[in-house]
Each structure stands twice: as structure tokens, then as C-alpha cells.
Image: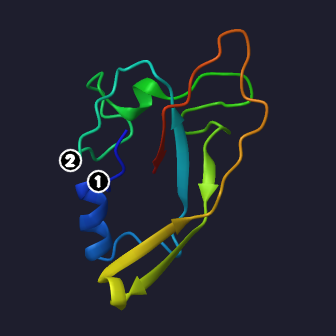
Amino acid sequence: MASFMFNPAINRIIGQSLNLDTDTLKVMLLNDAGNWTPDRDDEFVDFGAGNAPLDDELNVTNYTGGFAGGGRKTASITTSQQDANDRIVIILQDITWTTLGGASNDIVTAGVLI
């Protein structure tokens, strides 16, 4: 899966309604069910259309998805401006999920920062 930022997130960062340094951001894990096709215009984790990230969220032992689930972990992010390379670097601290699995193991195919 390609790495990219969603257009609504970029818009909120520029408009200063989303602050990568102070807002709580979570990482959700997706499986290989193939229900969701990434689209840069996606704005919500579940927009009820049957083609949302929530449709492919991992469902295994020690990972409880959903808005109240304990599987999504808080992300720690640092940003830096690199003038020599003409870019902004966003670094997500390593996150570890331990002993995921169960009777029907899913394959993790993506992590989405929400």
C-alpha cells in the first residue's frame, strides 16, 4: 500500500485545526480483506459506504478495533523542517502490538494514522 496523506488532513493542518504536536492521533491496523480502496479524499474512518478503512480493521485476539476499542494505539509524532532537502519530515515513533492473533489470524497490510 502506498504511503500518502489524506487531503482533508492536509487541509486541517494548513488551517491549523489539526496540530500534529498536540492533538491525540491513533494508529489503526488494517487486514487484507480488500474492502477498502485508499483514496486521498477520504475524510472519515467510517463513512458508511462499505468502502471505509473501518471495513478492513484488524479483528484478532489482543486487538479490539472501533472507536472505543483498545487496539488502536496513540501515536507520538515529531516533525522537522529540512531546508537543505526542501521538505518537512514527519516521524512516527515505533509502536508495538504484542501477541496479536487467535483462531483466525489476519494479515496486517496497513496502518492508518487517524
Furthest-right residue in view?
A: 99
Residue at numbered disc 2: 41
Q: Residue at x 38, y 69 (%)?
A: 18
Q: Position of residue 81 (x, y in %)?
A: 40, 85
Apparent side of residue 15 relative to residue 80 in the rendered image (left or right): left
Q: Residue at x 28, y 47 (%)?
A: 43
Question: Looking at the image, which is closer to me, 38 or 17?
Answer: 38
- Give the answer, above or below, for where 55 lies relative to 13: above
Disc 2 residue type? Asp
Instruction: State which quarter of the image contains the N terminus.
Output: top left
The reply to whether callout 1 and callout 2 are in contact (CB within 8 Å) is: yes
Q: Residue at x 46, y 22 (%)?
A: 32
Apparent side of residue 47 relative to residue 89 in the rendered image (left or right): left
Apparent side of residue 39 relative to residue 36 in the rendered image (left or right): left
Q: Secondary structure at mark 1?
A: loop
Mark 1 or 2 closer to N-term? 1
Q: Position of residue 20 (x, y in %)?
A: 46, 71
Q: Secondary structure at mark 2?
A: loop
Badge 2 crowding class, 10 Å Cα cut-off, few under 14, some 14 to 19, many 20 or more, is few
Furthest-bottom residue in view?
A: 83
Residue at numbered disc 1: 6
Disc 1 residue type? Phe
* Quarter holding residue 8: bottom left
Furthest-front residue in view?
A: 84
Q: Position of residue 79 (x, y in %)?
A: 48, 77
